[in-house]
Image: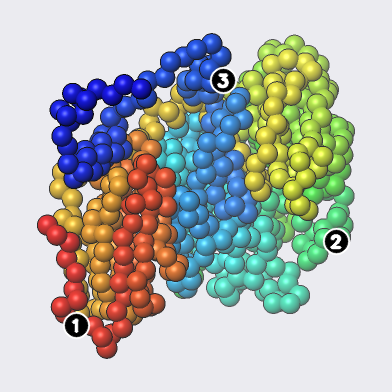
Amino acid sequence: MTVDTQAVKKAVITPGIVTALVLGLIVGVVTFGIVLRPEVTLTGDSQFNRPYPLPHQYWATTDEFYVFASGGQQGGFYVYGVPSMKYLSEIPIFATDQAWGWTPENPEIRSLFTNPWTGEIVERGDTHHPSMSKTDGVYDGRWIFINDKMFGRVARVGLDTFRTEQVVWMPNITGGVHGFSVGPQTELAILNIEHEQVPDPVIQDHLGIEVDLINGPYIAGFNGIVIDGAPGGDGTMDVSWQVWGPWHHDMVRVGWGESDGWIINTAYNTERAMSSIPMFGRENDYLYFWNRASIEQAIADGKYVTTEQAPDVAVVSWKDVEVYMTEIPLNPHGLDVSPTGKYILTSGKATTLIVAVDMNMVLEAIEKEDFQGEEYGVPILTTESVREATMDLGLGPTHIEFDDKGFAYIGFFVDSDAKKVPMGGPYTEKHGMEPWKVADVFPAHYSIGHIMIPGGDSAQPYGKYFIAMNKLAKDTFLPHGPLITESHELFSIGEVPAKMIDQMALGPESHYAQAIPVSLVTPNVLAVYSLPAQTEHPRVEYDYTNEVVNVYMDVVRSWFTPDMFTVPQGWHVNMHLTSQEQAMDITHGLAVDNYNVVTSIDPGEIKTIEFVADKEGVHWFYCNWFCSELHMEMRGRMIVIPQDEWSAEQEWQPAS
Ligand code: CUA
């Protein structure tokens, strides 16, 4: 071994300089992305020579749709790509999700969790039916709305940030809402009350129905949520009115095209029973047609009451509006409107039947007063006069979607399959087949709940793909305890028979999903929040009057400034965090040891975290997102000093 003594002599460097250089190098690499690679000689099959399995950005360039699947018990959305079936994201809404910073220590998020009447903070939910914003009945890529069944809430999520922007709570009810649908111009959303209620006596008086707390029979109806959703609107939702009547309602569609101007919903419990078996007491249940203009007219005529809880919400009686109903197979669940608004298809869970009601026939029957009776004063349209087809297709029919070629698809829970049926009328031109006969059957694994075709509930289905949201996935994946993951199965429906392309495991428990073309979403997605020209100077302020410490803290790779502060025990701590990052995907976290405090801060985001410093001692806080090579070094201390040991000298300021 030869040593270049000359070189050694030239390199007279002190240990201090070496340390400084190494540290500088690390900071440079980490902070500014200076790339230093070891010189590696590639020989033959060296592992360094291995080709990357797929081209860079493969999925980003091949996926055609974003799927927004309700998370059910997860309380928000799951987002994945189609056809890759690659999970992309979650959008927390009604439930805490610390990974996404969705925690009530942030006052803005807390306000979304807070019951406006009781002040109760609710961090649980059950998301059900997503509904995209639309213009002329076609998805427009601005927002997606969804309801929480448990607490009677509706949320709006921005498709630019994939974050929840607004939550509204339904008044006069105790939750239990189900069907939800946004109108063709994003001007109105309807949310059905499924779990029958004992409402405020003011409402009972107005309806002329007295409800006994124990014996009922209880009453229900649906909520009208007016949305500032015309082009240029900001999407603000306002619960404006409720229609109440003797029935509950399950699924709903706000009509468009040939059914424009009508709110169409179903009830599976027209028996008004309190328990399961008696809900199958009748041979049929009802499909309802509510004239939207008549509801507005009743309100304009002053035919409404308000309650103390909701003085701005007009409560209208079913007796004061124009409503009709028609018999449909027992305990309906699926209720879907074909792309032109012509056909309303419903399925009876307790039967093998799917029926197609023609909206034009409905309007004609109304015009001719072609009724076969009435119930609670509501005319029952003659079944044969409004129904174009009755199909006997299989066990446990659930939901229905449409493609772009004139076909309807129905999912079957018990049969564990989906059936494809050509529709009649104007759709015959598209497929040239005899309508309402099964054209394809494809199995799913197992027990389909909801189904989804991109755009399949709108005036413009995109078709091509079909997703079965299977409730049971037994035998499909490795066992992982008594609760098996949910499964989403992707089928290509451009061919007969439909071909299964892929299967994915997804957490509990999607009820419905909607898919929107990537081209409508991607151009608007925010990469970073833009910081104002001037942000708060890092500092600590002690407010002795209110016993609050305000910590103005900068967050950037790889430190907090200030990285320590002191606080008298029992005081409130308001940490005003500013992420000084402007680089995409560099999200930081803030977790406080031994405190129930955690959040995340996206690049450029400014947010406040509030808590009480109730535990004395030294509490490290740290960044819990892997943001840089020095992520673990990104930490600081909160020192909580008992009040009797506190003096103003212990106030802390960061070095300026
Ligand atoms: Cu910032 Cu980890």
Using the numbered discs, state the Cα–Cα distance from disc 3 to disc 2 in whole angstroms. Answer: 58 Å
Q: What's the residue type where badge 3 is placed? A: Pro
Relative to the observer, which residue lies in front, 102 or 38?
38
- Image height check: is 152 above or below 495? below
Residue at 36% over, 61% down: 621
Ligand 1 within 8 Å of disc 2? The answer is: no
**The label number, if any, that marks residue 278 in the structure image:** 2
- Residues marked 1 and 3 touching at CB (< 8 Å): no
Query: Quick one: quadrant of the C terminus?
Result: bottom left
Q: Which residue is drawn at 58% across and 31% down?
A: 86
Q: Is residue 605 visible?
A: yes
Q: Which of marks 3 and 2 is nearer the N terminus?
A: 3
In x, y percent, where is residue 297?
A: 49, 51
Q: Distance between the residues labelled 1 and 3?
A: 62 Å
Between 481 and 287, the one lying in front of the other is 481
Quarter location, residue 260: top right
Q: Which mark is residue 506?
A: none
Q: Amino acid under label 2?
A: Pro
Q: Quick one: quadrant of the N terminus?
A: top left
Identify the mark at residue 53; answer none if there is no mark: 3
